Image: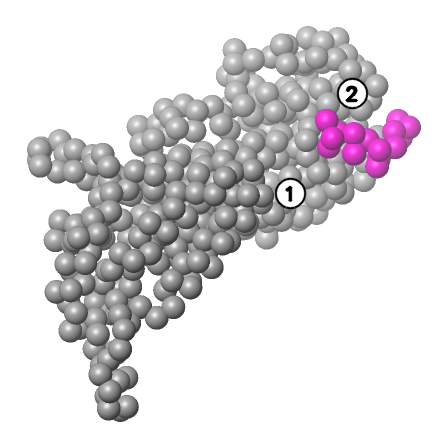
Amino acid sequence: MTDLLWPGAQRAGGTFSDTAFLAAMVRVEEAWLTVLGSPLPLEELVGEDDLAALALGAEDSGNPVVGLAALLRERSGEHRLHRGLTSQDVVDSALMVLLRDTVDRVQRQVLQQVAALEALAQEHRRTLMAGRTLTQHAVPTTFGLKAAGWLTAVLDAWDDLAALSFPVQLGGAAGTMAAAVEAGIDPVAARLRLATTLGLAPTGPWHTTRRPVTRVGDALVACTDGWGRIANDVLTLSRPEIGELSEAVGGGSSTMPHKQNPVLAVLLRRASLTTPQLAATLHTAAADQADERAAGAWHAEWSTLQTLARRVLVAATQATDLIGSLRVDPKRMRATAEAAADDLRAEQRSLAAPGHHEPLGDYLGAADVFIDEVRDRARLVLAASGRTP
């Protein structure tokens, strides 16, 4: 999928596209037929050629499942299709399938970032640079410690992603599964089999309890929070007057041939500025739930999740590219720090004066200890994921 208004959108491929959503809904209907004892392959019965008609018909019913179920029933000849389900069961379960697959792809990118940042922190643990607070020179630090800070943000995001669960939705019209029970179906056994078939977690109906949705949204935004922090440092330190970092391949200008713009960092910052609002929409919708099925609040989630998932996946690959090819200029970092030595050591001198002794050491404090702590955490994550640190 291309999007001229969101450069890089093609990186997400067909993730969460209309075609992918249709296929996921069909998987749910097919899995349910298996639960009913009438297994039947459905994936070949509908496809991209049906999207326009299904989208048009969705306006009449408020969701695409009504038209899809009718189409599948007509083409399969299976009268039991969709029996015992409701539209929300199909949509929510399909969304969870897509979110699970999206998160899996994001996690693979995050693992690459963890490995690259762990190595960067080690390589530059003694690379002296000026620490900056509130835009001004503060005290000495190292680029290794800065990279460890980036790594911490990425590891925090990893923890949130790894803790996610993707529950199946199965409740029938009002969360009681009354139609299934009426048909002689064991609701607990049916839920377990449906979940297992789809690779989801078996849980009770959550029609108007939307934490499964907001939890995924929060975890995805935690990723862009971390990447945005990295991007802002790259944008600042790649300014010509600072020149301590640069992207391996900068972007050009339409009129200025000398420009090497830090485009990946720019696009990552774009993502970090726009994804929190999407998660906020999910929380607003969760708070606006009512009765046993929500009117409007549920519907507000679908496109929001699509946009959020695709944007985070795009940003994930851009962050991997940025971190993996980042150019560090240790000489420039040291030169800046040495030129500002009087300011960077001012705090040290103020602490030494009452004791009537000369300032001691490099004033880097426990930087090495903190780097090692974060590296140890990263190495545990990599080892648990089957990657060699």
| Residue 251 appears in the figure | yes
Q: Which numbered circle lies on residue 165?
A: 1
Left or right of 273 on screen, residue 352: left
The image position of residue 5, as x and y in percent, is 31, 32
Query: Residue pushed farthest right?
Result: 184
Residue at the image position 24 percent from the left and 47 percent from the top: 328
Up-down: is 49 above or below 150?
A: above
- Front position among marks 2 and 1: 1
Magenta extent: 181-197
Scheme of colours in the image: one colour
**Amino acid residing under circle 2:** Thr
| Residue 228 appears in the figure | no
Which quarter of the picture shows residue 184? Answer: top right
Up-down: is 249 above or below 132?
A: above
Q: Quadrant of the N terminus?
A: top left
Residue at the image position 49 percent from the left and 36 percent from the top: 108
Dot 2: what SS? helix
Residue at the image position 38 percent from the left and 62 percent from the top: 368
The image position of residue 141, as x and y in percent, is 29, 64
Which of the marked residues, 2 or 1, is nearer the chain's N terminus?
2
Q: Which numbered circle lies on residue 173?
A: none
Magenta highlight: main SS: helix
**Does 52 lie within the magenta span?**
no
Residue at the image position 63 percent from the left and 24 percent from the top: 25
Q: For the residues marked 2 and 1, what is the alpha-carbon distance in whole angstroms?
A: 23 Å
Which quarter of the picture shows residue 322? Answer: top left
Q: Residues within 10 Å of mark 1 (few under 14, many from 20)?
A: some
**Does 187 lie within the magenta span?**
yes
Query: What residue did someone put label 2 on?
Result: 34
- From the viewer's side, name the closer residue of 33 and 299: 33
